[in-house]
Image (cartoon, coloured by chain):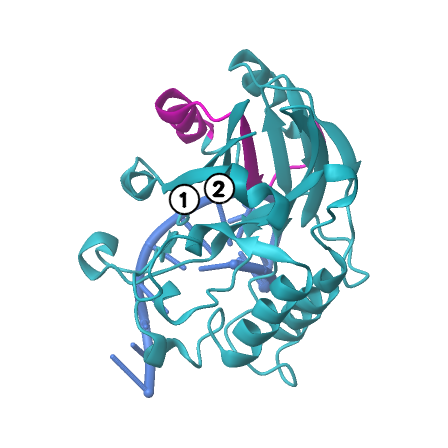
Chain colours: A cyan, B blue
Amino acid sequence: MAFTLATWNINSVRLRMPLVEQLIAERNPDIICLQETKCPDDLFPAAAFRKLGYEHIAIHGQKGYHGVATVARRPIEIVEKRRFCEIEDSRHISVRFEAGGRKILLHNFYVPAGGDEPNPQINPKFRHKLDFVQEMNAVRADENDGAGSILVGDLNIAPLEHDVWSHKQLLNVVSHTPVETESFEAMRKQGAWADLMRLNVPAEQKIYTWWSYRAADWQASNRGRRLDHIWSSNNLVPAFTGYEILRDARGWERPSDHVPVIARFDL
DNA sequence: ATGGTAGAACCTCTA
């Protein structure tokens, strides 16, 4: 039983519904996890998704900012919309679905970006980001009863040296500072999560999923970062059969600054 | 070293 799963920071789902349609036309993922939907739940384009065949919809949105959504061609059951750092931001939703006779728990995350100043003493947004990652230590790849877990989303941290265009130049830039990358990797390992996008890729190979809007020519400068991630419990690693970063989507009409990442599993 | 773009919503915040 094969299925594909896409994760994409869409940066306004209402504005970019045509791009979502393009993703579906080109790759037809079974499940789509969106972040930064920037859309209250009552304005979510649910009818449009249903029309496209995504009849199962789990949303956790708010007005103006943040917001996550998981939509699927197959039944999904909402498990939780977790609140982090005692703040009412919409940054998480988890659902359960069945594949190959196994129940799978799927977390969809939008981790705080953290502002520009990488000093938690003077930048509350960076403090919030660090606290958020700390709190994610409680989210583990539970393997009870043979079930598996998947965690995807815009995690806003590029943990490894070759997850950014220049390790040296980004050491003091939020998303790649040592305090972030170290607590991020510690949290991932502590939760027993496998970093699927790096599994079979040489450490020195660059992987990007995001290119800034601020570059004059994103393609020419190619100063990307790997901010979007796909993790799974170890018992799902044998079922993981590969992934694709839809880099082309960065060049689509009025693009998001993130591109979809699509993982394939065969259970 | 600096400033560059984009979205939501309405003033400025967030990224």
Q: What residue is at 44 percent from the left and 51 percent from the top?
A: A197
* Location of residue A35 in the rendering, given as x and y in whole percent from the top left corner: 56, 44
The chain under label 2 reads A
Whether A118 is drawn above or below A160: the answer is below
* Location of residue A157 in the rendering, given as x and y in whole percent from the top left corner: 51, 64
Whether A48 is drawn above or below A151: the answer is above
Q: Name the residue under label 2.
A: A8
Asked if residue A86 can be seen in this view, the reply is yes
Q: What residue type is labelled 2?
A: Trp
Neighbours of disc 2 within 10 Å: few (<14), some (14-19), many (20+): many
Q: What residue is at 68 percent from the left and 24 percent from the top?
A: A101
* Location of residue A152 in the rendering, given as x and y in whole percent from the top left corner: 57, 46
**Front position in the image: A213 or A6:** A6
The quadrant of the picture occupied by the C terminus of chain A is top right
Q: In which quarter of the image is residue A77?
A: top right
Q: What residue is at 29 percent from the left and 63 percent from the top?
A: A223
**Front position in the image: A239 or A10:** A239
Q: Do the residues labelled 2 and 1 touch (CB within 8 Å)?
A: yes
Q: Quadrant of residue A190?
A: bottom right
